[in-house]
Image (cartoon, grey):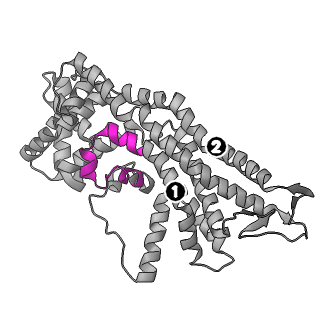
Amino acid sequence: MRLSFCNVELRPTTIYLAAGLASLLLTLIPVYPIYAFYRRGWYAKRDDIMSSFSDEAKQIYLQVFRLKTLDKAAASVEFDQMYVRRYGRYRLRFPIAALLLVSMPILFLFVETGITHLTMASDGKMVLVGLLRANNQQLPALPAAAAAAIAGAYLWTVLTLISGASRANMPPGVILTAAARLVISAPLGYAVAGLGLHVAGPFLAFAFSSFPLDQVQSLTRQLVSKYLNVDLSQTESDDRVTVIDGIDRETAVRLADADITTSPQLAYCDPVQVSMQTNINFDAIVDGQNQALLRLYLGADGVKVRPMGLRGAMEVRTLVQQMASTTPAISGPANATFAVAAAAMAIPPEGFARALDEVAEDPYTKFLANVWAGDTPVESEPALAAAA
């Protein structure tokens, strides 16, 4: 049986060659964003982190998170070496190789299936699925559900990697997840296609495979609950990370990738590591940690002192420093702010002062204050005193 497309006879070797070239091109599309990050994005992310750290901040970071006590010069060298060790570009080599080894054969089968679907036999009948015999050779073609699932997984992979490169963040886990997504796409497509009508099976397989992973997990949980009559709903805690200002559901999902689901976990996290794992801006992590630290000491009622300018632990540390100032123009307004905040919290001044001292002297608060503003001593009058 001869094969032809647009009245051009196709040999099996021609089909294989075309499928090989097309699969190579399709493989290079998701690899290019990784290459762009490897050449430029990695340095942009490193500069984003390093620009927030003075030598003193590096010294405090190593003391708090690595239990290393070094002088400033040695701490600066150690911090830079640690960053390259933990987040260096070399960590991308194996994930890139894995993605290449996985995607090439899968995409070859996908493209070959597409060519087979578009190929007509000499009698003019369209070949749809199955094995197509030509010149005593077999041309394998994937079932529609499997091919649709691979297409969905490929779409997710390309969009995810392009997004990561544009944001100058490409953790090795994202690349390995992309490779795993392609591997499981066909079985996932079969499983999902079996839930719907035969005609809608390929569409369901494509749609399910192209969803973000958190949505896939959510849908899977709902399906398991429906068919097994098992309640898999998660109860929410008052300490969930979404109580922090600026952390929405999408950000909470990304934080969960770093095993951070509650505000206490956020309060005592390693902000550099979390920023690298979640692709959340480093300053945003510091801001969330700042709020979580104050919530850890004052509880949910800590939001009552926000109108006094006490948004987080760093602001409390500044207030405590101002209260201890020997300059009346600085200590006076600070003590007045303290009194209003204590009244808002309905806590006796002695107890509230002790709580604020604990917040201000927490090692994590000192680290955040140094990273954010260098933790310089209060020397100038606050805006309230200047206005007076």
Instruction: Please give the range of residues in magenta.
Output: 253-278
Magenta span: predominant SS is: helix
Label 2: state its secondary structure: helix
Residue 63 appears left or right of 155: left
Q: In percent of the image, x 45 and y 74: which residue is there?
A: 222
Which mark, by number, is residue 197?
Answer: none
In this rendering, the answer to whether 332 lies above or below 7 is above
Pick whichever, 87 or 272, lies toward us.
Answer: 87
Label 2 packing within 10 angstroms: few (<14), some (14-19), many (20+): some
Query: Within the image, what quadrant is residue 329 found in?
Result: top left
Looking at the rendered structure, the secondary structure element under dot 1 is: helix
Q: Residue 34, image x and y in percent?
A: 54, 38
Question: Is 276 part of what is drawn in magenta?
Answer: yes
Q: Residue furthest top?
A: 73
Instruction: Inspect the image, locate mark 2, and give the three-letter code of the amino acid beneath it.
Output: Ile
Q: Residue at x 51, y 38 (%)?
A: 167
- Location of the N terminus by quadrant is bottom right
Image quadrant in which the C terminus is located? top left
Residue located beneath label 1 in the image: 181
Q: Is residue 280 above or below residue 375?
A: below
Residue 240: x, y in percent?
30, 58
Q: Tell me if I can see residue 88 in this picture.
A: yes
The residue to which callout 2 is attached is 29
